[in-house]
Amino acid sequence: MSELNSMEVDTTETIQDIAIKLVTEQLRNESRLATTPTERTLFVLGSKGVGKSTLINRFLDRDDVPRPTLALEYSFGRKTASGQGAQKNICNVWELGSLANSSQLIEMPIRSHGLQTFSCIVMLDLSQPDRLWTDLESVLNGLKQATAKHAVAGQIEEMKELTAQRIGKEHPDLSTLELFPFPIVIVGGKYDIYQNQDSEIRKHVCRCLRSIAHTLGAALVYYSAKNSSLSKLVRDTMNHLGFGSPSNPFRAASFDHSSPLAIPFGADSWARIGVTPSNSERIGLSFSTQIPQLPIGNGGILPDDPAKDVGFKEASIDELRSQKDEELMYVLKDTEIRMKFEVVQ
């Protein structure tokens, strides 16, 4: 009986005390979840020398002097939302330097982070319309192969459903489109040079890019590092994909080929473009007939030993590399001496 009485003394909490304790614990758990970092992945790839590194530096607020990207580079940005229990957001940023022999490199960001929070910035050089479709086709084929290889069962169809929601389930062209399973923004770079091209060329480029962006369920914008308003639009778009803000970077749409294009997800249509429903193969064939395309080159000449490039110094890795080089030289010299000794015998 004494034991029972002692138990009753230890449980003197009222219902109000218990409720306060439960609410406090719930708020603590919610705060803990809110401060857990959320990650998204942004993959920037496209034409060589179009300004991808400069664009990424501006997006990440870096003053680094851009250097040629040899293969695949990784960086990240971090933002903390304002308010109590602020959430930390991380954006993984990958950049592909060259499209030549790049199929395995294109797989890396998807293999590393998955597709669930994956987005692409496809940057094309408008000043070289004779390479435009070649570069774009290489990007799309690489992304399709990597997606098919690393997506889990049923994931592609589920994500295509999200793409359909992004462009609008009531869009009249929905049944004719070849939707990608993740957000793609096609960025036409070097607009400051391109705007001086012949009007007919600009019409063909505009029709091609609008058509392919529409059939993929992508957004399309023109960009120049020398134009502050275009730079802001692209940077806002990258912030939207990488961190979720602003909620809508496109304040207005522009469809006129004589001015910079700015076409949000789902804003275009075959009727507005002025063409019959098409697919990526026919779009590419039509554009290549109007503007013959050059093949993808070797992506430029790489240095004899990229590891010796001062822009790629890593103290710990370089020290290990030096040790391994010394060990290799020792083995080679030892082997050479042994061979000479065996010849003498």
Image: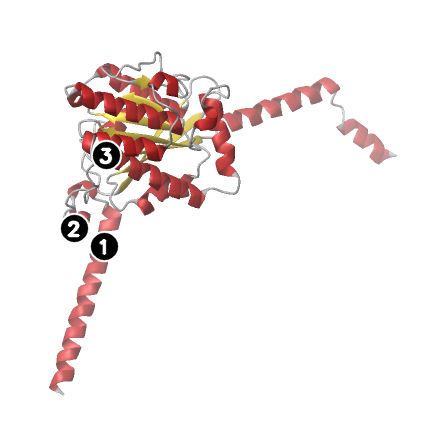
- What's the residue type where badge 3 is placed? Ser
Q: Is residue 262 left or right of residue 5?
A: left
The disc label shown at residue 305, or none: 2
Q: Is residue 313 left or right of residue 164?
A: left
Q: Is residue 39 left or right of residue 53?
A: right
Q: Is residue 131 left or right of residue 10?
A: left
The disc label shown at residue 69, or none: none
Nearer to me, 291 or 4: 291
Residue at the spot of label 3 = 47
What element does badge 1 sit on? helix
Q: Residue at x 27, y 29 (%)?
A: 56
- What's the residue type where badge 2 is placed? Asp
**Residue 9 in the image, given as x and y percentages of width and height:** 78, 27
First-in-chain label (1 vs 3):
3
* Residue 105 visible in rendering: yes
- What's the residue type where badge 1 is placed? Arg
Residue at the spot of label 1 = 321
Q: Can you tell which quarter of the image residue 92 is in?
A: top left
